[in-house]
Amino acid sequence: MGDIPHTLVEIVTNAVSAFLLIILIYILQHILDMHFECSCVAGLHLNGWLYLVAPSFIFTFVVQILELLRLKSEGFSIWHCLVCNCPNNQLCSHILKFVLKLVSMSAMWITVVLFDGDWYYCLKTNYNASQTGLPCKTNLTMEERRIKNGYRTESLDYGFFVLFVFLLLWSLIEMVKSYCPLKNLKTFDCTTPYYNVVYETYLAKEVTNYLHSELKEIAKEKAKALCGPHIENIRKHELPQSHTHDGNSTQRMDTVPETWSKISKCDFFLKEVTDSQMSSPTSPTTGLPASDSNSPTSVPSSPTSHPSHPTSPLSHQTSPPSHPASNPSPSTDSPSHPTSQPGPPESPSSPTARSASSTQTSHSSLQVHSQTDILELFDPLWVPPCNKT
């Protein structure tokens, strides 16, 4: 039952797109009937062919825009695929799809124009010097009327032929796609079991639904973390009786007008993400304090954490005798600074230095990847730089 809303939205979206396309075809066909006037001049004319070619591109771009809006509402960015997936032949795939849409829309519009017959009648008479001017005459003789009806009937026949060829090719393509999955067309392998193809289709849908739900929850948590201080500031201003002033709080709070101005800016999200990653004391990826994730002392291999670690000679001289069961440690005069005692310097190749260096490197790389993922998540049209490797 959880699949019904998504399926219903998809059906409604496709129905609305088809309805808008039909309305657009009707409007253009009505304009063609009302405003198309034959030039009645012998020869080829650009405006005559413009009526046949321009609407085909208009229909194609309308369908492309509707598809882009649908994909954007689902969180998919086609521009990301066009820019960053060129090595995987995604660019050629999208170009081929656009060409197929153009051919489909052209066949549909040419069929409508040929069914009408006026355009073909004007074209044929302009190419025949003895018949030029017939579409502009009001009183036609019997012979001229017969010529007009003959051209209209011929135009209707061509319209049926174009429609038949287009539907035949469409049916063949759909049959091939049904029996041979797209990934097997390169090797002409059509032996894949039917339910294997069905399973892969369902799996793709379920993976998409699962990713949408999980990413939505992550986005909610991130939005709450970004907007929480601003919402709390507004809540304290609008509902002062429900909050008491905290005298121990030293954090600088924006005024309410500043808060309204910040959250109303179109780039509020991008600035908040950048500021939180640059000024926050905690790591945006691991949740650990920045000092703990970057400092070498956060590595558990410290001198005071292992009883068997040798202490410096100075610590043996200054420290008082301790109980035999106690842990050997530096002098008790400075317990809060165990690393300040003089001792043998750590070499760059020591385990402590290597662990600290790797921790710092991984922390910085996680910050960059986190910012990239968050930007791509909230803005489907944002395109990250392509990975050349």
Image (cartoon, rainbow, N blue to C red):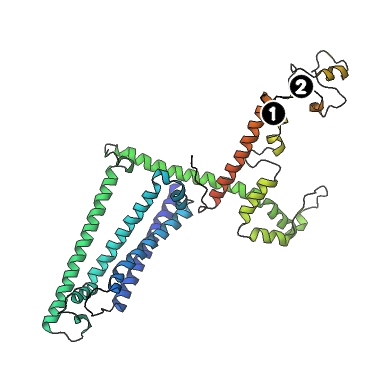
Question: Going by the picture, which residue comes out furthest to the bottom?
Answer: 139
Which residue occupies 23% across, 61% down?
Answer: 163
Residue at left offset 63%, top offset 35%: 361
Question: Where is 190 relative to 326, above or below?
Answer: below
Q: Secondary structure at mark 1?
A: loop
Residue in the picture at 72% in, 37% down: 291
Q: Is residue 196 above or below residue 57?
A: above
Figure quadrant of residue 180: top left
Mark 2 residue element: loop
Q: Left of 126 or right of it: where is 1?
A: right
Determine whether, in the image, residue 310 is placed left or right of residue 79.
right
Q: Position of residue 32 (x, y in %)?
A: 30, 74
Left or right: where 144 falls relative to 256: left
The vertical placement of 276 against 365, above or below, is below
Q: Nearer the viewer, residue 214 or 24?
A: 24
Residue identified by numbered label 1: 299
Give the numbered dot on residue 178.
none
- Tell me the amino acid under the disc marked 1: Val
Local crowd at mark 2 within 10 Å, few (<14), some, or many (≥20)? Answer: few
Q: Which mark is residue 344?
A: 2
Of the numbered discs 2 and 1, the one sitting upstream in the chain is: 1
Crowding around mark 1 (Cα neighbors within 10 Å: few <14, some 14 to 19, many 20+) is some
User: Which label sits in the foreground, 2 or 1?
Assistant: 2
Q: Position of residue 144 (x, y in %)?
A: 14, 81
The location of residue 96, given as percent across then percent down, is: 34, 52
Q: Is residue 388 or residue 242 the one in the foreground?
A: 388
Note whether residue 289 is visible: no
Q: Is residue 85 left or right of residue 122?
A: right
| 3D distance between C-alphas at marks 2 and 1 | 18 Å
Q: Nearer the viewer, residue 130 or 168?
A: 130
Q: Report which quarter residue 311 is drawn in.
A: top right
Residue found at x 79% / y 22% = 343
